[in-house]
Image: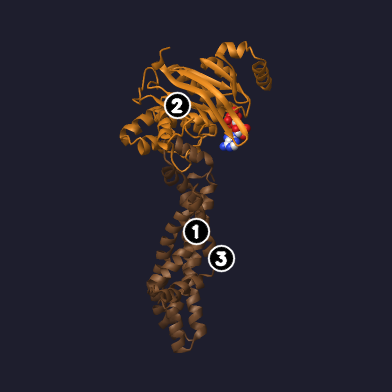
Chain colours: A brown, B orange
């Protein structure tokens, strides 16, 4: 193994993670959660239209490959006159994707809160939206942390697909160094290791968040 | 009784869930400062009545009037104009909100907010919904919690409390809203037997203080001591009503007699 190359490429790879992978994942996840919340609320609303739109959206996202979604946005849309740069394309594709998966998580979490909590919220005079925000979502949050953490961890790994639409994130840096040095095994294992470390850190963070949200639950 | 002294007037309240007709024209009057106990077998529609009064259920027909008076005869005197909802016509969400604003409910299963402390549970409505000054609300909440012996628990979460303590918080949460009318739905039936008396004592105290209340209960001894009127319902209709001592000791109707006999034998 070429340790010199390992150490000399670690810097560029980490830079790719810090300037590419991580911000891409964070931005997409934040936007994705907003979309998911909106879609989840549509899915539990009494409006048939909102419900139907939400259902079709979730079905489309979950029923098509992420890579295809990415390609449609970056390589497909220019054909109809919509040209989007690599970074925004990636963020749009990933956040729409997260939105579809997380919407179902949030919807299930909302439905898992007992009906009596809605009634108690209404009893003290809250509107539906107030009850949702103040009473239901905080309780749903606790239930959705484990599945949403999984969604986020998947997303961090999936950002490597953005290399295929020319976003300079960590894996694209690894590909470039590998092509130049012809040390494919070394570079790809090095990239794998960094993904792994990031995901381990995220799992630890997940445990902490769960603990914090557990403070009002019997043990 | 002058009409202004009537806190609650229910006329012809009807409700079906699909093919299941649950309420068939219920009339109910609660004068200011009086306590009405609703009794009847499971499934007779008692909860549905309370939920309708709190706007949690939309009746199909009938009307509900809440008068301008209420609260206690001595203490709080909420300034809310009298309100009538006519369910034969379409009622707006605004009207439902206005109805809800006038009563407060204590649930069978407490339904405290598990992610909030005791104090937060109590002040959430007054502060967030009624937009009253927080300091004032907290002071009132503390006084109410002291009254029911739970001041030391104000910063605890519901899961740290016994069922009886949770239900007393449920009562304080309702009182903090300063309603004109208190609604209790079997407030002690989810409690272990040894915890029932503490909760009933609190409710009895509120009755003595002059709160206007409707209480659904299976505690006949409590109803006899506390209620001014007992209403027995079965199958969605009022079968018998009258002064507590009369309905509970000398019921006139066959069905009332059977029900009371069965309840007494269970104990
Ligand atoms: N949301 C609902 N949907 C359908 N049926 C209901 C609903 N709520 C109550 N019911 C029915 O109405 C009847 C009366 O219920 P309820 O008012 O809870 O009676 P009680 O409190 O006297 O036991 C029952 O048959 C119950 O199944
Ligand atoms: Mg009931």
Label 1: chain?
A
**On the picture, is B129 further left or further right than B241?**
left
Say which residue appears at 46% left-offset and 82% top-offset. Answer: A175
Say which residue appears at 48% left-offset and 52% top-offset. Answer: A42
Q: Determine contact: label 2, label 1, CB under 8 Å.
A: no
Q: Is residue A120 above or below residue A103?
A: above
C-alpha distance separating marks 3 and 1: 14 Å
C-alpha distance separating marks 2 and 1: 43 Å
| Secondary element at tag 2 | loop
Say which residue appears at 46% left-offset and 64% top-offset. Answer: A96
Give the mark toward the camera: 3 or 1.
3
The residue nearer to you, when weighing A61 against A108, is A61
Label 3: chain?
A
C-alpha distance separating marks 3 and 2: 56 Å
Is residue A173 visible in the rendered image? The answer is yes
| Secondary element at tag 3 | loop
| Secondary element at tag 1 | helix
| Residue A156 coordinates in the image, percent (x, y) | 47, 68
Q: Tell me the number on the disc at residue A63.
A: 3
Residue tagged 1: A102
The residue nearer to you, when weighing B260 against B171, is B260
Label 2: chain?
B
């Amino acid at each position: 193994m070429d340790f010199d190359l390992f150490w000399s490429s670690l810097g560029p790879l980490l830079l790719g993670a810090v300037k590419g992978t991580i911000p891409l994942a964070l931005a997409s996840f934040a936007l994705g959660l907003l979309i998911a919340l909106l879609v989840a609320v549509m899915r539990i609303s009494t409006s048939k239209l909102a419900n139907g739109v939400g259902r079709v959206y979730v079905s489309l996202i979950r029923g098509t490959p992420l890579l295809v979604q990415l390609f449609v946005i970056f390589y497909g849309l220019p054909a109809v006159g919509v040209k989007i740069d690599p970074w925004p394309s990636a963020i749009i594709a990933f956040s729409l994707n997260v939105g579809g998966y997380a919407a179902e998580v949030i919807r299930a979490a909302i439905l898992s809160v007992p009906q009596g909590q809605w009634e108690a919220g209404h009893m003290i005079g809250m509107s539906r939206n107030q009850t949702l925000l103040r009473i239901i979502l905080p309780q749903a949050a606790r239930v959705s942390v484990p599945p949403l953490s999984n969604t986020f961890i998947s997303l961090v790994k999936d950002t490597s697909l953005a290399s295929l639409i020319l976003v300079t994130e960590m894996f694209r840096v690894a590909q470039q160094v590998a092509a130049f040095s012809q040390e494919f095994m070394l570079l790809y294992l090095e990239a794998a290791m960094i993904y792994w470390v990031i995901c381990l850190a995220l799992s630890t963070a997940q445990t902490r968040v769960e603990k914090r949200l557990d403070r009002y639950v019997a043990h | 009784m002058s009409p202004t002294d009537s806190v609650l007037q229910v006329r012809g309240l009807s409700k079906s869930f699909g093919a299941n007709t649950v309420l068939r024209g219920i009339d109910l009057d609660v004068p200011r400062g009086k306590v009405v106990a609703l009794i009847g077998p499971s499934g007779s529609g008692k909860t549905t009545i309370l939920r309708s009064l709190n706007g949690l259920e939309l009746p199909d027909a009938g009307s509900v009037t809440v008068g301008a008076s209420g609260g206690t005869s001595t203490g709080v005197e909420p300034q809310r104009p009298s309100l009538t909802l006519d369910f034969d016509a379409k009622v707006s969400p605004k009207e439902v909100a206005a109805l809800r604003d006038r009563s407060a409910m204590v649930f069978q299963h407490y339904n405290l907010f598990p992610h909030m402390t005791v104090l937060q549970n109590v002040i959430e409505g007054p502060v967030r919904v009624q937009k009253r000054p927080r300091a004032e609300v907290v002071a009132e909440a503390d006084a109410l919690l002291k009254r029911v012996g739970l001041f030391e628990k104000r910063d605890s979460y519901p899961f740290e409390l016994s069922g009886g303590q949770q239900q007393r918080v449920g009562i304080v949460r309702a009182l903090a809203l300063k309603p004109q009318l208190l609604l209790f739905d079997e407030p002690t039936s989810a409690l272990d037997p040894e915890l029932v008396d503490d909760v009933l004592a609190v409710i009895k105290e509120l009755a003595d203080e002059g709160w206007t209340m409707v209480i659904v209960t299976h505690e006949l001894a409590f109803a006899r001591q506390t209620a001014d009127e007992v209403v027995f319902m079965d199958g969605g209709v009022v079968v018998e009503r009258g002064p507590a001592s009369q309905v509970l000791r000398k019921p006139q109707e066959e069905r009332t007699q059977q029900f009371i006999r069965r309840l007494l034998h269970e104990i």
